[in-house]
Image (spheres, helix red, strand yellow):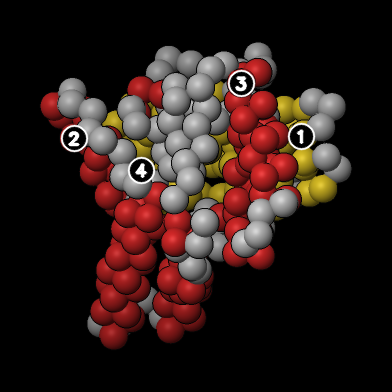
Amino acid sequence: MKKWMVLGGEANSHMAATELVLKLNNHTWKKHVMNNRIWFYIGIMLCGLATAMAEPVSMPARSMEYYDLVAKVYIQSVDSHVEHTYHQSSDSELAGHPLHVELVETLRKTDRVEMSKLLVPAWTTINGRRYDNPDLGAGYYAPSNTVSIACKRCSSGKEWCVVEWVLTDAMWDTYLKQKETGVIDRPLLQEDYEIQQRLDAVRQSRELRKRMKAGEITREEYKRRSAPLTDILSQPIHGSTF
């Protein structure tokens, strides 16, 4: 599996991402990897939001101290009709929707974070082409959902704190262990991370089905909340294709 590393500051992030775009455009197997999810995160990398600490761009940062906020949150609403541009350059742009949440459990929260200034990425453009955030369409941010998120404050001088990752249960446990012990473990490989996503999806799907059978939620609620889990289970594991 190829790992694309960011080895310096924002300039090196941009160069590495541009090289990645060119390689993907000419890749023999590009039909396997040219989807919205990959291009969306390439857009984030182009905008200088990816980690500059030699981390793989396809997974959360090794240390949770890279982020300004790591927390489990209860989703109250997403203002999908409101957009704020939080990065703009000659060849790329990022915009997000205001995200309203209630903190359930917090592993890290710096003084720079204002909970009223949370954004969930809505779309990115690369050289004039737009790519939407697949996590929005998958329903992760549906009202009443509880999700684990890792957020970073904009480096552009704006006050927005932007969601970079919806964390799997395994990654949350990794960060929890960091907080408790101070030990930073080796990050999961991309294949391991995506496999863990699917295991989490299976577990959550079973739990939802159990709650439906017990009469705790309706069939309609079960279908709505199962939809993003089904989407995860239907996706290929990208690490096995290139």
72 or 135: which is nearer to us?
135
Within 10 Å of the Cα at label 3, are there few (<14), some (14-19), or many (20+) other Cα atoms? some
Proximity of marks 4 and 1: CB atoms separated by less than 8 Å: no
Is 7 above or below relative to 172? above
Find residue 157 and report its horizontal and vertical position in percent: 65, 14
Front of the two marks 1 and 3: 3
- Mark earlier in primary sequence (2, 1): 1
Query: Residue beneath label 1, please?
Result: 93
Q: Earlier in the sequence, mark 3 or mark 4?
A: 3
Q: Residues within 10 Å of mark 1 (few under 14, many from 20)?
A: many
The kind of secondary structure element at disc 3 is helix
Mark 3 and mark 4 residues within 8 Å of each other at the beta carbon: no
Say whether disc 1 or disc 3 marks the residue closer to the N-terminus: 3
CA separation in Å, label 3 and label 2: 31 Å
Which residue has dot 3 on it?
12
Instruction: Identify residue for label 4.
Output: 72
